[in-house]
Structure formats: C-alpha cells, structure tokens
Image: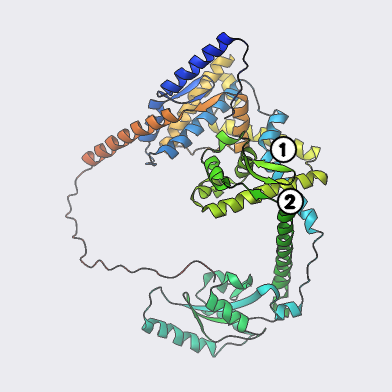
C-alpha cells in the first residue's frame, strides 16, 4: 500500500488531521480488518470466513492476512470493473511490471556479455582427462532397503556379481534396462548423462573418476545399493558431453566475470543488511517505497524499496520471502549482494542501450489488459455482466461487491478455487484505489475465528455417531521400520 502525503495548508487542518490520526491510533480499527475504497471487511466477517470454513485451513494470522488480501484485491477489481477502468494506464503498468522488464533486460545484457567470453572447446582430450571434473557415465543399480542387514546386502551383492560377469560395453545399456533398480535411468540404458563429480555421493564419484573411457567397474557400494558403472568412450558420449562442457565453461566464465564486477564496483552489503532484508520480506508491500539503504556500490546504492521489487519479481511458487525468514544471515547477505549486482548490471544495460522495444511494451499492455478481463470473468464481475444488471456506477459497485463476497464464501466452503491476483495487477490496483489492512482488526479476527473453530469441532465430535463395532486393541509391538536411505545427492 502506498502512503499518500498530506498537503498542509492551514494550522487548523493540521490540528484536525492530528486528532484524526490519534483517534485512529487509539481505536486501532478493532472492528475492521480491511478496507477497499468505501467497502469494509469487518472483524466478524473475516473471522466467520476463517472459523466456519469447511476446508479446515489453519486459523492463524498468516491465513487471515492471505484471506484479507484476497478480499481487498477482489473488491478493488470489482470497483475498477464497475467504473469501466481496465487498469491499463501505461505509466502504472510500467511501474508495476518493473521487475518483469528488469529481468528481461538483465537476461539480454548477460547474453551480450557471454558472447565475449573465451572458453575452451570440448574434445576427446578434455573428456579423457575429465577437465573441470565433468563426467558421463551409465550405471546398473542393485538396491537394498535402508537399514538392510548384512545378510540382505550379501544376497543383493551376489546377484550383482552374477550380472557383472555377463556385462560388456556392447550389452551394458540393454542389461541396465533389464536389471537396474534405478527407474530414473534404467529406461535410458542406465545413462546418467553428464554431471560434475561433486553432484554424486563420494563412493560413486570416486569410482567414476577411477575408470578410463570404455571401462566397466566392479561393484561399488553406496547408501542406495550396489552399482556397476560404465564410463563410455568419447565417441559414445560426445553429444551429451560437448553440450555440458560448453555450459560448464560458460558458467566458469560467468563466475570470473561476477567476481571481477563485485571487486571493481565495490559491492558492499550494509552490516544490518540481513536483518533489514528479513524485516522487509515479512511485509513486502509496506516497504515498496522504503528508501533506506541496504547495500552500496560505486556510483549508487540499493534501497530497500528496490530490493523488495526484485524479490517480488520472482515466481510466487518459490516462496522467496518465506525462505528468507528461515535462512541464515550469511545466505541472506549473499542474496542481497546478488540483487545489488543486478542493479549494477542494469545500469550497464542502460549504457549499452538495452531497453524494451515499443513493440514489446505494447505487447505488455495488451497482455495486462487481457489478464484483467480474465480475472473479472473468473470472479463474475466483468463489466458487461455488471452493466446488464445495474445502470449507475454506485449500483454496479454494490453488485460487484456482493458477487465478490459470494465468491469468497464459495472458496472457503470448497466450492470454488481461490483466484490468485498477479502482483503487477495488485500494484496497479493499490496505486489507483484506496485500500488498507488493519493489523489490530486481523488479530481480533483470528481470536474470534479460533473460538468459532473450537465450537464447530466440539459440535462435530458430539454429533458424530458412536461406532457399533468394537475397535481392535492397539498392537503391542511398537517397532517400526524406518527408511534410512539418504536422498541428498544423486544417483
């Protein structure tokens, strides 16, 4: 939400504003959880949505904020539709889509930089010498369960040794398809593709490194079972190896470029950078205009607001803000530094004339408009359906608001799916229309919702019919089998 500065004309106006501010602070909007233009989400309404939901969702502050944000975004979309506002103001869309366009420009800049990298070419020599720790291998896995006894392991090993005597470089792929217990590679003739040594568990990677091209290993034991490994010849592995080698070379060159850039531009994260980043991540929208400095570099600074915009540009499914809250400060500092580096490279992109073309901007506006219209239709508040039932703008707004409330009821009862509003649309909505979520109201909603949920759970328990069938006694043997197999690394 953006804070709008109040113009001060007369002392009396200032006094009145101060009184209103004090009244707002003291009352803390305990009866209102959120507002969207002239619509209110009352504490009772939000707590009813949470506490009476048949979805059995967690009743806590995080869930309440999610539902409150949905309500605000849906209601503002309704207001926009009722007023015939397609939300396609170019300046607002440009600002809202800044993260998207910045990432696109950054990719183009790095593509142009990558063309200047000088890297070695893949060859039979680099393959044979495993230059850069890059390998290609096939394997046949004879797996045993986690916690297997030595007798079980011996039985598996005996089978593996029997198969090993039958293997040749020519029949290895067919035998892998027939015998390997690794479903991910068996159908590819046991092929693991190209990989770096550190990507595999140590016993496996050590065994691969000990093989010459064309050789087949004896049985190798890892926590997954017994492996028979083949390192194919360069001629057999050329396609996969050459591609991976080129990518690996580019990555090494990028690492050198990044290290030099950090040093030349003196990119530095502030001493409190990790704490500041975590605080901003807890409430991103409240920090979009935050001009506090979180990192610096030669000729500029990274503000908290710019940092937030970059965080918001990542796909929602990454849950980056939540990850930051749990990550160690050292990792968060590295992330902040990478964002500062992005800012530096964007300035270099500007200098190189890398911008969004007029055609790309027009496509952005068109797609944004189509997105808004799709959201309207999904919520049942598209402009046509509203105008067919209501003539004046106030009547259309009232109708849109009621349809939004009905849709939320269906969502919370499991009859409809929640519609996620993309961040750029949220940004435009909150830039054009008034909205606010009140923490005190949200907290009261959670308290009341917990009571509602407890009452509902108690009622269900009382009304549940008693079983007419005697229940079996619990087993006396509490020994449980546990899978102790590691899952941290390939293969």
Name the residue nearer the viewer: 467 or 292: 292
- Which quadrant is the C terminus positioned in? bottom right
The furthest residue to the front: 271
Q: Is residue 366 left or right of residue 115?
A: left
Quick check: 426 left or right of 325?
right
Please determine whether, in this image, residue 12 is positioned above or below residue 301: above
Q: Is residue 52 visible?
A: no
Q: Residues within 10 Å of mark 2 (few under 14, many from 20)?
A: some
The residue wearing badge 1 is: 364
Residue 154, x across and y down, in percent:
41, 85
**Front position in the image: 293 or 54:** 293
- Give the residue drawn at x 71%, y 78%: 127
Residue plotted at (45% across, 22% down): 25
The alpha-carbon separation of the residues under discs 1 and 2 comes to 33 Å
Residue 203 in the image, given as x and y percentages of width and height: 53, 78
Q: What numbered label is drawn on residue 15?
A: none
Residue at (52, 20) in percent of width and height: 399
- In which quarter of the view is residue 11 placed? top right
First in residue order: circle 1 vs circle 2: 2
Circles 1 and 2 in contact, beta carbons < 8 Å: no
Colour scheme: rainbow
Secondary structure under badge 1? Answer: helix
Residue 103 in the image: x percent, y percent?
70, 46
**Figure check: 189 above or below 412:** below
Could you say whether the residue bearing mark 2 is in a helix, strand or loop?
helix
For image coordinates 69% across by 37% down, the residue present is 367
What residue sits right under mark 2 in the picture?
265
Can the viewer see residue 204?
yes
Question: Badge 1: few (under 14), some or many (20 or more) residues near its Cα, within 10 Å?
Answer: some
State the image quarter where residue 355 is shown. top right
């Amino acid at each position: 939400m953006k804070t709008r500065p109040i113009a001060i004309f007369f002392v009396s106006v200032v006094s009145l504003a101060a009184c209103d501010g004090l009244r707002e602070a003291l009352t803390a909007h305990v009866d209102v959880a959120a507002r969207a233009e002239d619509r209110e989400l009352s504490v009772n309404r939000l707590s009813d949505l949470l506490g009476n939901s048949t979805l059995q969702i967690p009743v806590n502050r995080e869930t309440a904020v999610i539902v409150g944000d949905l309500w605000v975004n849906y209601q503002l979309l309704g207001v926009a539709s009722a007023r015939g506002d397609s939300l396609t103001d170019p300046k607002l869309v440009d600002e809202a889509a800044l993260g998207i366009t910045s990432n696109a420009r950054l990719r183009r800049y790095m593509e142009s930089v990558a063309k200047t990298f000088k890297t070695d070419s893949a060859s039979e020599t680099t393959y044979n010498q495993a230059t850069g720790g890059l390998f290609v291998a096939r394997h046949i896995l004879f797996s045993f369960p986690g916690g297997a006894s030595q007798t079980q392991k011996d039985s598996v090993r005996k089978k593996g040794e029997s198969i090993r005597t039958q293997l040749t470089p020519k029949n290895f792929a067919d035998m892998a398809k027939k015998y390997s217990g690794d479903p991910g590679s068996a159908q590819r003739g046991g092929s693991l593709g190209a990989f770096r040594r550190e990507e595999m568990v140590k016993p496996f990677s050590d065994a691969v490194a000990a093989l010459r091209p064309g050789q087949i290993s004896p049985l190798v034991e890892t926590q997954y079972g017994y492996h028979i490994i083949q390192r194919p010849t360069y001629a057999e592995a050329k396609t996969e190896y050459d591609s991976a080698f080129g990518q690996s070379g580019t990555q090494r060159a990028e690492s050198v470029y990044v290290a030099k850039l950090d040093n030349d531009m003196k990119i530095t994260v502030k001493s409190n950078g990790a704490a500041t980043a975590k605080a901003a991540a807890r409430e991103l929208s409240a920090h979009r205009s935050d001009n506090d400095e979180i990192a610096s570099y030669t000729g500029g600074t990274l503000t908290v607001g710019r940092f937030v915009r970059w965080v918001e540009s990542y796909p929602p499914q990454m849950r980056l803000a939540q990850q930051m809250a749990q990550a160690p400060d050292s990792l968060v500092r590295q992330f902040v530094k990478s964002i500062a580096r992005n800012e530096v490279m964007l300035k270099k992109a500007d200098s190189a004339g890398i911008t969004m073309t007029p055609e790309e901007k027009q496509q952005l506006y068109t797609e944004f408009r189509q997105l808004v219209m799709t959201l309207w239709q999904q919520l049942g508040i598209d402009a046509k359906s509203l105008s067919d039932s209501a003539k004046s703008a106030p009547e259309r707004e009232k109708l849109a608001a009621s349809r939004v409330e009905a849709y939320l009821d269906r969502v919370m009862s499991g009859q409809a799916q929640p519609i996620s509003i993309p961040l750029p649309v949220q940004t435009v909505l909150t830039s054009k229309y008034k909205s606010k979520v009140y923490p005190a109201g949200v907290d009261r909603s959670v308290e009341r919702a917990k009571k509602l949920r407890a009452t509902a759970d108690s009622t269900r328990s009382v009304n549940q019919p008693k079983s007419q069938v005697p229940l079996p006694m619990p087993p006396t043997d509490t020994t449980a089998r546990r899978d102790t197999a590691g899952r941290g690394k390939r293969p």
